[in-house]
Image (spheres, rainbow, N blue to C red):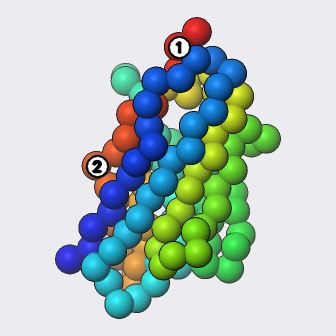
């Protein structure tokens, strides 16, 4: 059973920074894709950033230049450094990983940016 756990959300003022962490455990295989999605109230879920096992990354246009995704040194860990946060970044952020062809997602962590 694979478990995905996110942490690091919270309340921050506009212009501030937060760092989200995600760890997946329970599989002998390594994740080949790790990604962050977000969903704001009344909006569709959207991809924020994704990183492959080879280190390739891609970002949503709305966060390019402000957010950075990186894989940790520990197996199946990923971080999302969020700088210059805006009120429109307010959402529940979910970590999604792909392990052996199967996608797993955590329960999410709330990020709230006040103006």
Which mark identifies residue 95?
A: none
Residue that lies at the very extreme toward the right in this rendered image: 65
Q: Which one is in front, 103 or 25?
A: 25
Q: Which residue is mark 2?
A: 107
| Place of residue 46 in the rendered image (x, y in percent of width and height, measured from the top left) | 50, 42
Quadrant holding the C terminus: top right
Q: Which residue is mark 1?
A: 114
In the image, residue 45 sits, relative to residue 14, either above or below, namely below
Q: Which one is in front, 39 or 112?
A: 112
Q: Residue at x 47, y 74 (%)?
A: 76
In the image, residue 77 sits, relative to residue 65, either above or below, namely below
Q: Which one is in front, 42 or 81?
A: 81
| Place of residue 42 in the rendered image (x, y in percent of width and height, measured from the top left) | 37, 23
Q: Residue at x 58, y 17 (%)?
A: 13
- Dot 2: within a 10 Å radius of its alpha carbon, few (fewer than 14), some, or many (20 or more) residues? some
Residue that lies at the very extreme toward the bottom in this rendered image: 28
* Alpha carbon distance from label 2 to label 1: 23 Å
In the image, residue 113 sits, relative to residue 99, either above or below, namely above
Can residue 58 be seen here?
Answer: yes
Of labels 2 and 1, the one closer to you: 1
Q: Earlier in the sequence, mark 2 or mark 1?
A: 2
In the image, residue 64 sits, relative to residue 56, either above or below, namely above
| Place of residue 100 in the rendered image (x, y in percent of width and height, measured from the top left) | 39, 85
| Place of residue 29 in the rendered image (x, y in percent of width and height, measured from the top left) | 40, 88
Q: Is 15 situated left or right of 96 in this image?
A: right
Quadrant holding the N terminus: bottom left
């Amino acid at each position: 059973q694979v478990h995905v756990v996110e942490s690091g959300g919270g309340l921050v003022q506009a212009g501030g920074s937060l760092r989200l962490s995600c760890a997946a455990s329970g599989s002998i295989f390594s994740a080949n894709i790790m990604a962050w999605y977000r969903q704001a109230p009344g909006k569709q879920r959207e991809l924020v950033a994704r990183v492959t096992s080879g280190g390739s990354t891609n970002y949503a246009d709305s966060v390019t230049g402000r957010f950075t995704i990186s894989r940790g040194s520990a197996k199946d860990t990923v971080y999302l450094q969020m700088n210059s946060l805006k009120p429109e970044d307010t959402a529940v952020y979910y970590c999604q990983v792909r392990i052996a062809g199967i996608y797993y997602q955590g329960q999410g962590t709330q990020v709230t940016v006040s103006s």
